[in-house]
Amino acid sequence: MGKIEINLLELAVVYRGAAITVYWLPLNKRGNSNSRERMASLKRFLDQFGWNHSKGFLADREFFGDQWLGWLVE
């Protein structure tokens, strides 16, 4: 099939039931994103929009790690 692997970390907002990608980070590797990549993507969003415009946060099962979860709680 395809000869090019594309791996993106995407951040989307949900509006009226549709997810709209607002930021993406190309991951030049196979596998999951790491805490640093996740924090950079979410920080970029928060710097522009802030938490007060967010009603919630949803991530899949690959979003784990003490550093990442500690940063979110903080």
Image (tube, helix red, strand yellow):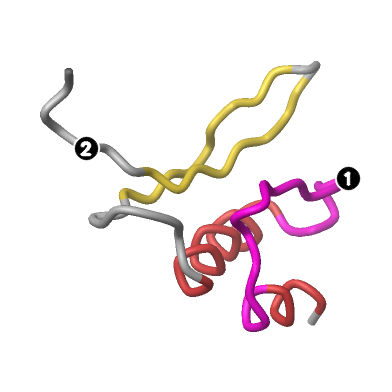
Say if the magenta span includes residue 54.
yes
Rounded to the nearest angstrom, the CA distance separating label 1 from label 2 is 33 Å
Task: Mark 1: give few (<14), some (14-19) or many (20+) Cα within 10 Å.
Answer: few
Secondary element type, mark 1 = loop
Secondary element type, mark 2 = loop
The answer to whether 43 is drawn above or below residue 18 in the figure is: below
**Kind of residue indicated by mark 1:** Lys
The answer to whether 37 is drawn above or below residue 9 in the figure is: below
Q: Position of residue 5 (x, y in %)?
A: 22, 37
Give, as a single range, the part of the protein colored magenta: 50-68
Give residue 7's quadrant in the image.
top left
Q: Position of residue 64 (x, y in %)?
A: 65, 66
Query: Closer to the camera, 31 or 9?
Result: 31
Q: Main secondary structure of the magenta part?
A: loop
Residue at x-position 69% and y-position 49%: 59
Residue at x-position 85% and y-position 55%: 52
Q: Quadrant of the N terminus?
A: top left
Q: Quadrant of the C terminus?
A: bottom right
The answer to whether 70 is drawn above or below residue 15 in the figure is: below
Say if the magenta span includes residue 11.
no
Which residue in the protein does label 2 denote? 5
Which residue in the protein does label 1 denote? 55
Query: Closer to the camera, 17 or 48?
Result: 17
Q: Nearer the viewer, mark 1 or mark 2?
A: 2
Q: How many marks?
A: 2
**Kind of residue indicated by mark 2:** Glu
Q: Position of residue 38 (x, y in %)?
A: 53, 63
Q: Left or right of 42: which side holds 3?
A: left
